[in-house]
Amino acid sequence: MKNGRKAFSLLLALLLLLSLPLIARAEGEKQPQKAQDLSKFVRFESCGHADLEGKLFRLALTCPETFLPYERFNISWDPSVDAHWLCIQWEKMPEHVRLLQYDQNDALLSETAVGEEYDTILPLTADTVKVSFLTERRGMTIAHMGLYSDGVLPDPFYPWKKASGHLDYLLISTHPDDDTLFMGGIIPTYGAEQGYVGTVAYVTTPSRLRVNEAVMGVWAMGSEYYPFFLDFCDLNNQRSEEARNKFPQEAVTLAVVRLLRQQRPLVVFTHDVNGEYGHWQHKIVSAAVQEACKLSADESFDPASVQAYGVWEVKKCYIHLYPENPLVMDISTPLASMGGKTALEVASAAFAKHRSQQNGRHLIPAVDDALTMNRFGMAYGTVEAGEDVFDNIDPALLVANMN
């Protein structure tokens, strides 16, 4: 009997060993294939621009190239190159830029108008061997490009979903990284874990590098929607009159009203009225957002955006550390959607994406710190606060219920 059990055990072990390659292969098949960088196969056709290959393909973000209004240039590659994606990082937010795809016979295959985002991922048709860049009256400035095969693209080119003019929530952050430091529990909790649709709007755009860090941070927090950039200047902690003239509250309010009317969020989050640690731009953004939430529904304010988007009624506006109508978030419970990490841990990982800010002066607030990210108060609302963010909001207005 013992010999029989021993023989059975040996047979079982042998079968297990034989099955390991099959198991490994099956597990390997589950791993998504990384896209191959094909940029070395690209040829440039342009006038008056020297060494574009070196500037735009090999020296990432360090040598942006500016093209004049109505200027056109082409990139091309051999038909044997299996290109699926052209990824473009704009140094400045693109306006009125078109991308035209051609086959080897110079027949036009498609034409794409570039959206107002700092990153463009252009899917290429099977027969595309040339892409033309055509500017209009504003020109364009490109920081970096990459041509890729099929597969998972490198950071920060993520498979973003398009916000369709309706959001459940919107974080309005002064600088890239403020959202992780002071509001970092919102996206992991309400977005990734509970499925509400939302993202971040950054009021200032310090640099193209900081844009990359912001995009990677938003993705790391669990949002599937590309962030917005309002493109105001980051003036650090300057308090001079000249600096304040470059960041007037009225201009910030107007920009936020236009964004609210365009994207139609139900709930808005923003900074402490005292600027967390006293930052004057945080204070202005906090005041501007509160005012914008009221003005967004006023059809007499900014007729241009009323005509373009209509008015919009924000249901709730939550302010970091605001004492009234308090909301204390749970950021210590493991989240299934984030691999068992807590919202606090997710925020810490997202802040790590902001590598330029890892100088020891910016730290994720602990749960019991004065600047803790889990404490908010409803400063404005057209419905009762309730105990949770989406309490007393008509469920029919939520994005998931509108489809």
Image (cartoon, rainbow, N blue to C red):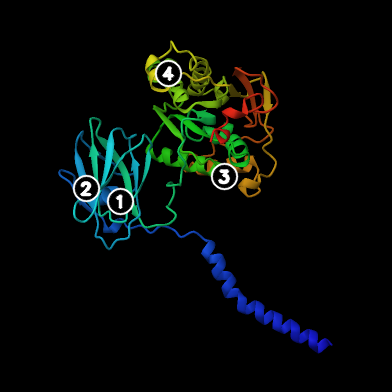
Could you tell me how many numbered marks the image carries?
4
Q: Between marks 3 and 4, how big is the CA–CA gap?
A: 33 Å
Q: Position of residue 310 (x, y in %)?
A: 44, 20
From this viewpoint, which residue is outermost toward the right? 1
Compared across the picture, whether 295 is left or right of 104 comes to right
Q: Which residue is denoted by mark 2 in the rendering?
A: 74
Viewer-proximal residue among 265 and 333: 265
Badge 1 density bin: few <14, some 14–19, many ≥20, Cα 10 Å: some
Q: Position of residue 60 (x, y in %)?
A: 34, 48
Disc with the residue nearer the chain's start (2 vs 4): 2
Amino acid residing under circle 2? Asn
Q: Between marks 1 and 3, how big is the CA–CA gap?
A: 29 Å
Q: Which residue is denoted by mark 4 in the rendering?
A: 254
Q: Which residue is denoted by mark 1 in the rendering?
A: 57
Disc with the residue nearer the chain's start (1 vs 2): 1
Disc with the residue nearer the chain's start (1 vs 4): 1
Q: Quadrant of residue 77?
A: bottom left
Disc with the residue nearer the chain's start (3 vs 4): 4
Viewer-proximal residue among 387 and 236: 387
Pair 1/4: label in front? 4
Quadrant, the N terminus: bottom right
Amino acid residing under circle 4? Leu
Q: Quadrant of residue 331?
A: top right
Query: What secondary structure is found at the residue carrying circle 1?
Result: helix
Q: Position of residue 392 (x, y in %)?
A: 66, 23
Q: Between marks 3 and 2, how big is the CA–CA gap?
A: 39 Å
Amino acid residing under circle 3? Ala
Q: Position of residue 344 (x, y in %)?
A: 63, 40
Disc with the residue nearer the chain's start (3 vs 2): 2
Viewer-proximal residue among 296 and 349: 296
Question: Are the residues flagged by discs 3 and 2 in contact, CB closer than 8 Å?
Answer: no
